[in-house]
């Protein structure tokens, strides 16, 4: 079934600290895909056919402790960090339709309604939890998920808590067969495909019922459980519902909409096993795809405050420009596996691909067109051939391999450069022959400007403006060498 709308989301970030470039990668990736679908479906960016959601996850112990450490009330702390996160995301030209906060009143209302409905199904019950809890993950842990020192592998510097407390539980164990069938029968539900096998292997061990609340006396910063103000909704249950909050209120949570979640590998279980079970429990529509990307390391090391290697997106944008940062992470980011980056590598890619590759080719053809004194109307090439070429270029958007789409575009640029060198238009004296050669080259640049729009939109717009007139003039250098 071809779906007429697309709803794209990122995971929402804890407001314990301002986001760094590793967290921002997911926003760049999702933004690129959202921009592609807007081009494909003819959406202006106002959410007619494509809706793009990002935001902040503001409840729970992690955020509350960060506030206390600064001698602030939780709401004052999350207000400040959420604003700064939004500024970082805006610096990357992320075209979200809504920046949701889990402290938004409409979201709190939807969480209450969602949990109320779950309580009525009988699959949510109150019992005692005895076990382990990682504050870093905001997640309950089994012994098998900890290392030999009883540490969370993702948060080695944090002590695991041993809890004994009353909670509301969700009958997650009931949904094992449903989840197996979902993954096996829906090959696009988890991408890349390797993550499907990982989740199926996890399901083979069975699922334990999971706490979905914490005692108010321990975690007062959260949404009260409906009908029981001594309990607060578990932060992950609250956070996952953000997608439904925005989707249902904007008409994008239905069978006519392709729903795509972009998430990091650390939260894959929550999004592929817990979230669909929560939705099935209340008989709500399921997402179509959860795309799981890897992590970014800096100079071979994990990005962390303790290592002092945190880089904010705005710092890179200030140094290289927003489109260069977007290009680098879309081409060399952790689309399937973890990657290690460096500022020096970014500079090398900037000079090779943008200053020399794209920038030089655009400048070269603009100069040749200007010097020729000829006029170049749009649509002088075979339109069927042009559409076929665009389909070929954009094909890997089908499985979100934006890196391979960029690779294909740069191959086209290399072919165009080869065409210029092979035909040597500066030597052609026959005006008709010169017009044929430059017509092709000018229109290929126009195509490239459309193809790069989801990736580096500011640069795309500059090229489109430069080449939109029949009389083409040279402009300022797009990417000065660094």
Image (cartoon, rainbow, N blue to C red):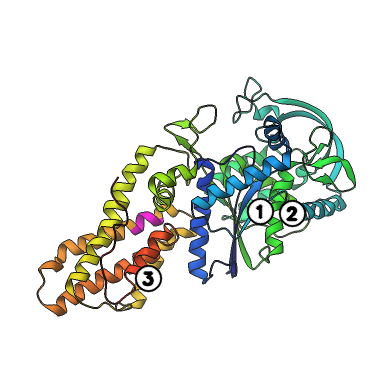
Residue at the right extreme of this rendering: 227
Asked whether residue 13 is in view, the answer is: no
**Badge 3 local density, few (<14 within 10 Å), some, or many (20+)?**
few
The residue drawn where x is 15% and y is 63% is 422
Query: Is residue 407 found inside the magenta-colored segment of the image?
Result: yes
Pointer 2: what residue? 107
Q: Is residue 285 above or below residue 65?
A: below
Instruction: Check the picture and name the quadrant holding the C terminus.
Output: top left
Which segment did they paint magenta?
405-409
The residue drawn where x is 32% and y is 70% is 467
Q: In the depicted view, which residue is nearer to us: 365 or 338? A: 365
Residues at circles 2 and 1 in contact by the CB criterion of under 8 Å: yes
**Badge 1 local density, few (<14 within 10 Å), some, or many (20+)?**
many
Q: Is residue 15 left or right of residue 469?
A: right
Q: Distance of mark 2 from mark 1, alpha carbons?
A: 8 Å
Q: Earlier along the polypeptide chain: callout 3 or callout 2?
A: 2
Q: Is residue 432 above or below residue 344?
A: below
Horizontal and vertical percent for residue 141? 70, 32
Image quarter of residue 236: top right
Q: Earlier along the polypeptide chain: callout 1 or callout 3?
A: 1
Instruction: Check the picture and name the quadrant holding the N terminus.
Output: bottom right
Pointer 1: what residue? 100
Main SS of the magenta segment? helix
Which of the two discs, 3 and 2, sits closer to the camera?
2
Horizontal and vertical percent for residue 70? 67, 32
Residues at circles 1 and 3 in contact by the CB criterion of under 8 Å: no
Q: Is residue 110 left or right of residue 92?
A: right
The residue drawn where x is 22% and y is 62% is 364
Pointer 3: what residue? 388
């Amino acid at each position: 079934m071809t779906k007429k709308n697309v709803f794209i989301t990122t995971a929402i970030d804890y407001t314990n600290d301002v986001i760094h470039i590793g967290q921002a990668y997911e926003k760049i990736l999702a933004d690129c895909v959202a921009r592609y679908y807007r081009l494909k479906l003819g959406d202006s960016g106002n959410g007619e056919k494509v809706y793009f959601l990002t935001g902040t996850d503001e409840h729970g112990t992690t955020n509350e402790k960060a506030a206390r450490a600064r001698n602030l009330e939780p709401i004052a702390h999350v207000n400040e960090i959420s604003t700064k996160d939004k500024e970082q995301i805006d610096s990357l030209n992320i075209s979200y339709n809504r920046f949701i906060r889990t402290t938004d009143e409409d979201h709190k209302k939807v969480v209450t309604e969602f949990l109320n409905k779950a309580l009525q199904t009988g699959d949510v019950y109150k019992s005692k939890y005895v076990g382990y809890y990682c504050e870093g993950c905001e997640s309950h842990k089994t012994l098998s998920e900890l290392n030999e020192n009883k540490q969370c592998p993702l948060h080695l510097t944090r002590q695991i808590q041993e809890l004994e407390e009353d909670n509301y539980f969700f009958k997650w164990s009931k949904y094992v067969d449903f989840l197996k069938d979902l993954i096996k029968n829906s090959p696009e539900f988890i991408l890349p495909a390797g993550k499907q096998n990982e989740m199926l292997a996890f399901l083979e061990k069975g699922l334990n019922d999971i706490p979905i609340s914490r005692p108010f006396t321990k975690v007062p910063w959260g949404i009260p459980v409906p009908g029981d103000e001594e309990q607060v909704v578990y932060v992950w249950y609250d956070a996952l519902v953000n997608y439904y909050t925005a989707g249902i209120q904007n008409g994008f949570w239905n069978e006519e909409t392709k729903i795509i979640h972009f998430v990091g590998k650390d939260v894959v279980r929550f999004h592929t096993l817990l979230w669909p079970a929560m939705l099935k429990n209340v008989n709500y529509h399921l997402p179509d795809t959860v795309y799981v990307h890897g992590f970014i390391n800096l100079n071979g090391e994990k990005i962390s405050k303790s290592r002092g290697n945190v880089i904010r997106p705005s710092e890179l944008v200030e140094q290289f420009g927003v489109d260069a940062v977007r290009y680098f992470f879309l081409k060399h980011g952790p689309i399937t596996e973890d990657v290690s980056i460096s500022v020096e590598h970014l500079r090398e890619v900037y000079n090779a691909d943008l200053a020399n590759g794209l920038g030089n080719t655009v400048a070269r053809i603009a100069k040749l067109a200007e010097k020729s004194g000829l006029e170049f109307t749009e649509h002088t090439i075979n339109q069927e051939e042009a559409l076929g070429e665009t389909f070929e270029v954009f094909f890997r958007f089908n499985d979100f391999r934006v890196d391979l789409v960029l690779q294909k575009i740069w191959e086209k640029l290399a072919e165009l450069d080869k065409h210029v060198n092979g035909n040597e238009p500066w030597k052609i004296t026959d005006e008709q022959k010169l017009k044929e050669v430059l017509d092709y080259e000018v229109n290929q640049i126009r195509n490239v400007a459309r193809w790069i729009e989801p990736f580096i939109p500011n640069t795309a717009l500059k090229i489109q403006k430069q080449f939109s007139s029949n009389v083409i003039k040279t402009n300022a250098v797009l990417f000065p060498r660094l």
